[in-house]
């Protein structure tokens, strides 16, 4: 290593801890910004170059006069769930940071139609002036970092590609190259299908809301329909309210789980209209069951979830069957004790 290389390596050793702190601070900042803007992502990771990696970089590329010429000493990687969310996150980054356009690249736009592979968006960024002056970011003002944004499928491709050891089409044996191309097409199709599914689910949820206003007679029960039932059904809200009074607790968020849907199916309730009929039929028994809970419990939660009325309805319907094998199967599937099965048989 020449004297200039050694000088750069020595300088990096002396300031590396500052870059590590920079990584942590910016990762935390991005996490808060995403949360405030209600943007959901799969993960945010951070890394600072190791001394060994830094040394290899400056030896390989003899073009650096100072550390400020090296833009990827600190790095943040944001993995989104969907490819279209990459642009949503990108707009946030552009708004909240100073972007070094000269050194940033959207590798997605650089992908030739006849090439394979998933690429990501790479920003070289630094703190904006106002944020750089804050005490918690003292010493980071002029530092740059690389921010990568890619979807989870893009990330999967990149990780497998890296593990195999081929980074471009020309490195891959010709007889295998076509298989890479097919796989890339499948991943791109899968990415678009997931986006389509998400949009269709949003449309479905809106349609269900409208149908619920008209009574929701023969709507099949799933997570979306059950959530909307708890949200808008007057009888469900009334019973939930009475449960909260009996338990001397406030009503919290709506809770709808796959276990609840499975248990409803177990007792033969598959449509919203049937659910409402059963709630009317067993209204007094639901409240009696809750009163038993209060008598038997030592620690009563200060808040209960909306939709608790359905949870207790299921128990009441199971109990009224007076079928020991039916009760035992229900209790066992929920991993409750045998004594609870005895209780349900005597309810």
Image (cartoon, rainbow, N blue to C red):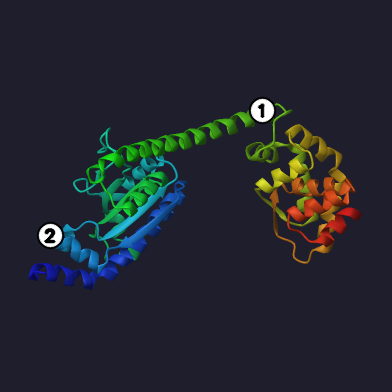
Q: In the image, is residue 229 above or below residue 142?
A: above
Q: Label 1 to label 2, Cα distance in Å?
A: 65 Å
Task: Tell me the mark number nearer the camera, choosing from 1 and 2.
Answer: 2
Q: Indicate which disc residue 310 carries.
A: none
**Most foreground residue, 308 or 196:** 196
Residue 135 in which image quadrant = bottom left
**Residue at x 76%, y 57% (from the top left corner):** 248
Disc 1: which residue: 211
| Secondary element type, mark 1 | helix
Residue 127 in which image quadrant = bottom left
Q: Is residue 35 left or right of residue 259?
A: left
Outermost residue toward the left in this view: 3
Q: Position of residue 299 (x, y in %)?
A: 75, 65
Q: Is residue 28 left or right of residue 323?
A: left
Disc 2: which residue: 64
Structural crowding at the residue carrying mark 1, measured as other residues with C-alpha within 10 Å and reported as few (<14), some (14–19) or many (≥20): some
Q: Is residue 191 left or right of residue 286?
A: left
Outermost residue toward the front in this view: 175
Q: In the image, is residue 316 above or below residue 235?
A: below
Q: Position of residue 266 (x, y in %)?
A: 76, 43
Structural crowding at the residue carrying mark 2, measured as other residues with C-alpha within 10 Å and reported as few (<14), some (14–19) or many (≥20): some
Q: Position of residue 96 (x, y in %)?
A: 33, 49
**Most foreground residue, 3 or 35:** 3
**Residue at x 78%, y 34% (from the top left corner):** 274
| Secondary element type, mark 2 | loop
**Residue at x 16%, y 62% (from the top left corner):** 58
| Quadrant housing the N terminus | bottom left
Q: Position of residue 78 (x, y in %)?
A: 38, 51
Residue 127 in view (yes/no): no
Residue 24 in view (yes/no): yes
**Most foreground residue, 135 or 147:** 147
- Upstream in sequence: badge 1 or badge 2: 2
């Amino acid at each position: 290593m020449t004297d200039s290389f050694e000088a750069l390596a020595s300088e990096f050793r002396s300031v590396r801890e500052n870059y590590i702190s920079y990584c942590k601070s910016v990762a935390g900042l991005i996490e808060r910004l995403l949360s405030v803007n209600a943007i959901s992502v799969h993960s945010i990771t951070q890394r600072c170059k190791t001394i060994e990696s830094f040394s290899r970089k400056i030896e390989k590329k003899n073009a650096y006069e100072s550390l400020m010429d090296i833009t990827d000493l600190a790095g943040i990687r944001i993995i989104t769930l969907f490819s279209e969310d990459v642009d949503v996150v990108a707009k946030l980054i552009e708004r909240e940071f100073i972007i070094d356009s000269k050194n940033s690249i959207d590798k997605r736009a650089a992908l030739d139609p006849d090439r394979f592979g998933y690429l990501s968006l790479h920003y070289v960024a630094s703190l904006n002036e106002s944020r750089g002056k804050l005490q918690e970011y003292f010493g980071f003002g002029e530092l740059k970092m690389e921010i990568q944004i890619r979807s989870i499928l893009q990330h999967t491709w990149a990780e497998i590609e890296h593990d195999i050891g081929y980074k471009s089409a020309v490195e891959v044996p010709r007889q295998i190259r076509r298989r890479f191309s097919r796989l890339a097409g499948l991943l791109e199709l899968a990415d678009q299908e997931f986006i389509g599914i998400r949009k269709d689910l949003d449309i479905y949820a809106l349609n269900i809301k409208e149908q619920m206003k008209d009574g929701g007679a023969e709507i099949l029960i799933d997570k979306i329909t059950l959530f909307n039932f708890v949200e808008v059904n007057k009888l469900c809200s009334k019973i939930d309210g009475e449960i909260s009074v009996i338990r001397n607790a406030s009503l919290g968020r709506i809770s709808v789980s796959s276990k609840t849907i499975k248990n409803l199916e177990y007792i033969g309730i598959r449509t919203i209209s049937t659910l409402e009929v059963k709630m009317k039929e067993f209204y007094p028994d639901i409240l009696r069951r809750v009163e038993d809970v209060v008598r038997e419990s030592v620690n009563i939660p200060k808040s209960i979830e909306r939709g608790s009325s359905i949870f207790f309805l299921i128990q009441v319907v199971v109990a009224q069957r007076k079928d020991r094998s039916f009760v035992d199967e229900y209790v066992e599937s929920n991993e409750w004790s045998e004594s609870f099965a005895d209780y349900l048989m005597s309810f």
